[in-house]
Image (cartoon, helix red, strand yellow):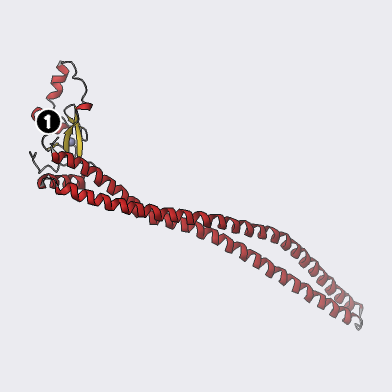
Amino acid sequence: MNADLEKLIELEKVDHEMARLSDEVSALPGRVALIETRLAEHKDEIEKAKTAIKNNEASRRKHESDIQAAQQKIIKYRGQSSSVKTNDEYRALMHEVEFAEKEIRDSEDKILELMVLLESEEKALKAAEAQLKVEAVEVEKEKAEARTRTAEDEKLLAEFAAKRTELRTGVNDSALAHYDRVLRARKSVVVEARGQKCMACFVLIRPQTWEEIRTNQQIVTCSSCGRILFYDPASEPPPPPESPKKKARKQVPEAAEAETEVPTEATPTP
Ligand SMILES: [Zn+2]
């Protein structure tokens, strides 16, 4: 095989691998940020649970002071009741006492409810704290993994970069320029030609060009998509029996099956 062609095949593998690694490296900070968000959410839950408990305590204190105030009122009303002159005044005072007693009962009910609620609030806090503990360990592990992966990827990238430079220095300039142009425009550059077709755009190759490709001795580009073509005898199917249909197919103009616009300034280089 032509030495440049061989190097370009190798170069493309290196370029694809480098692109994959670069993508992975740039995606990792995002992954770590996502993990951190998850941790922050658990911390938030703990804060909410703590706030709920604080509010519960504050409400209970409020009801307790309400009870004390009502008790004070009752003492005051009872004190006044001994010095009232009329039945109406007495009844009015007793009514106030009843009202204060009801206030006390209501507050006591509320306190009981709050104590029941407190139990579930404390349970929720404990669960959130336990989960955060588990999550924190997991997050540290994942972050460490991300750091290790990044370091490994960067080491590999450096190795591939060196290999890439080495491969590129050995290749003919115009072939290399063509390779770079096609790589920028398309996902693949060096593709197999099989059954007289470019396996990327499936355009039919002219017989003379096909013969050139089959030797693998020169850089030949697809007239339609501009990719560099190579031939692999191992994947060539056994020749089909001659038929009129095959003849007709050969007359199909190549442009009919062409892909998009073609970067084919580079002519086949020997
Ligand atoms: Zn093609």
Identified at 65% across, 65% down, the residue is 53
Quadrant that contains the C terminus = top left
User: Which percent across, then down, holds residue 14?
Assistant: 25, 45
Identified at 20% across, 20% down, the residue is 238
Left or right: 153, with 14 as reference point: right
For label 1, count other residues whose C-alpha is less than 10 Å away and answer few (under 14), some (14-19) or many (20+). Answer: some
Compared to residue 218, the image places residue 139 above or below, namely below
Quadrant that contains the N terminus = top left
Identified at 65% across, 67% down, the residue is 55
Ligand 1 appears in which quadrant? top left
Compared to residue 203, the image places residue 67 above or below, namely below
Compared to residue 110, the image places residue 75 above or below, namely below
User: Which percent across, then down, holds residue 148?
Assistant: 40, 54
Residue 82 in which image quadrant: bottom right
97 or 114: nearer the eye? 114
24 or 155: nearer the eye? 155
User: Which percent across, then down, holds residue 256?
Assistant: 15, 32
Q: Is residue 247 visible?
A: yes
| Residue position marked by numbered label 1 in the rendering | 215
Disc 1 residue type? Thr
User: Which percent across, then down, holds residue 83?
Assistant: 91, 84
Q: Secondary structure at mark 1?
A: helix
Residue 98 in which image quadrant: bottom right
Left or right: 159, with 239 as reference point: right
